[in-house]
Each structure stands twice: as C-alpha cells, then as structure tokens.
Image: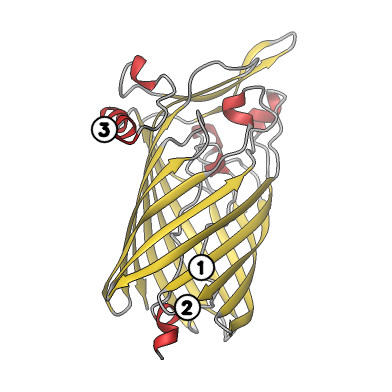
Amino acid sequence: MACRSPGEKRAAPFSVRNQHPVELTVLQQAPRAAKSYASGPAVLALDTDWTSHWVFPKQGKDDLRMDGETLRTNLRVGWGLGSDWDLEVEIPLIYASGGILDGFIDGFHQFFGFPQNGRPNYPRNQYEIRALRNVPGQGVATAYELREDELGFGDIPVHLAWFPVRDTHGFSLGLRASMELPTGKEELGFGNGALDWALGFSGQWDGDWLSLFGWGSYTWSGTPDRARQAGLSYQDRRLLGMGAEIFVFDGWSAIVQAEIQNSVLGNLDDPNANGNQAPIYAGFRWRMSPGVALDAGVGEDLLPNVSPDVVLHVALRFDL
C-alpha cells in the first residue's frame, strides 16, 4: 500500500491552461490525471485564474497591444462512464479590467530578477487588449479585442477520455477527444464563434512520494469573423507539457509544471504575438479532508515579452 500513496491521493497536475486572452478563445485541453473518474457524478471543481497581461508595444508590422488583467473562473464537472471512460465539461466566466496588480508585479519581478520588458516605464493599471492587423491598401484593422469591464461566459469545452493503461508498474495513460461549443460572445472577445476540436494524451507515473505527468494536444482552431475580415487566420495549436507532484507530508504536496506551445496568432506580424509560449506554474495542494483539495500556485512566462505575465491560480476540488 505504501508504494501507491500518490495514486491513492489522486495525484494530478494543476488544471490550468494558458491565460492569454486570444488563446482562451480557442479550445485547449488543460492538464489532468491519467486516470478515469469513478462511475457516475465524480468531480466538481472551481478553477480561478487572476492574470496580469503585458507586452512591450509595437514590435512588428502588425501590433499586439496587451496591458490589463483578466479574471477567469471555470466550473469543471466530471462523470465516470465506466472503468475506462469519463466525460468532463467546463463552463468559464471571464472578466477583464485595468486591475490593481501592476505595482505588486513590478516588485515581484524586481525581487526575483525577472525581466521587466519596460513595464515600469508605463502608467500602472491601464487597459488595452487588442490585436491590430495592417491590411495593405486598407490601413489598420482590429482583428481581436477583449472589452473592458464586461462579464460573460466563454466557449464551453467538452472532453471525452479513454484510459487504456491503468497502474501498470505505476504508469497510466489516457487519450482525450474534445470539442468546444461557441457560447462566448465573439464581439466581446470571449469566444471565436467557431466549433473547435482537439485530440490529446495524458501520461502519469506514481512512485512512493512522487508523481510525474506528461501531456500533449493538437487543436484545430477556428478563426473569428473579425479576424478573418482583417485578413488574419488563426493557426492550429500544438502543445506539450510536463510536471510533478511531490508529497511533502500528510495532506500537503508541492506541484511544478510547464508547457510549450505555438501561438494561434502565428500569422500576426508581431514577435510579441507570433512566437512560442512557455508558461510555468509552481505551488501547493492541500488535501483538506477526504475528497476535498485546495490548489494554489503562481504562473510565470519563461520566454521574454510574452503574455500572460503573471498568473495567480486557485482551485477547489470536490470528489463526489
């Protein structure tokens, strides 16, 4: 029994995805454990991410303007469909504003020696989140805009998972097929108005005091009408991630994880927008009681001048 302690405690990575506002409009499979849920209603979780966005303005022919904060709360519900299958649905709620985090983040970056990318030289707690396209013969067109001080639902992902390998020498493997319903208002920047699809995998190895995770996915991205009218098409997303959960002592564990992905704005001529993104997250999990866990972590960008800048992640999960 001792050698299976992580598995018994439902080891899993943080269920957090890239919080870049444009990336949020395209389906992404958030990391999860490579084990199926129990039959019937199995999981109820609330994932909340408070994110500061900043990139240095105007670096290419086009222009990604990213200065503001987003708050995204995601209700996640999971059902077990048998010993090897389960279904998961997410309902995200999104709000954007100029926020209050700029002073804290300037100090955070200075304390740890992280790049500031010119951020302290600009006014604090301002707001502008837009992608501008320089259209030959027509001038500048807005390809994407996230409206300030608007509260609304994002697109709703639905994930069907199959787990063909379970606890074989500590290793488990899951495969997922996902679709995202276009429920977010495209004109407010909450969705892309298209039906997105994705295929992915998740792997997991559980040891005595350590669990290791790996995941990857490919998303066929839909392009919003506004971007298409500006002559911009979204790229399909390719993503790989890895992480670990370390069981420190009873009820507490440390988690670290990182991803690398291409940008759906790969066709926008601005290096702040069209390069790869590599967020990293670190934090802890507190198992407050049997079936109840609280996650808290901080996310940072590993690559310079790429949004999101800093993510504060909190999640509460109930195993039903």
Q: Is residue 282 left or right of residue 188?
A: left
**Quarter of the image where one finds residue 70:** top left
Q: Going 47% across and 78% down the picture, which residue do you hit? A: 207
Residues at marks 2 and 3, CA–CA distance in whole angstroms: 38 Å
- Please, what secondary structure does the residue beneath circle 1 have? strand
The disc at residue 207 is 2
Q: Is residue 266 visible?
A: yes
Residues at marks 2 and 1, CA–CA distance in whole angstroms: 8 Å
Extreme residue toward the bottom, this view: 1
Q: Going 42% across and 76% down the picture, which residue do you hit? A: 10
Q: Is residue 284 left or right of residue 198?
A: left
First in sequence, mark 2 or 3: give its number.
Answer: 3
First in sequence, mark 2 or 1: give its number.
Answer: 2
Whether pointer 3 and pointer 1 mark residues with C-beta atoms closer than 8 Å, the reply is no
Place of residue 124 in the rendered image (x, y in percent of width and height, measured from the top left): 30, 21
Residues at marks 3 and 1, CA–CA distance in whole angstroms: 32 Å
Whether pointer 2 and pointer 1 mark residues with C-beta atoms closer than 8 Å, the reply is yes
Crowding around mark 3 (Cα neighbors within 10 Å: few <14, some 14 to 19, many 20+) is few
Three-letter code, disc 1: Leu
The disc at residue 104 is 3
Three-letter code, disc 3: Phe
Q: Which residue is mark 1?
A: 212
- Please, what secondary structure does the residue beneath circle 2 have? loop
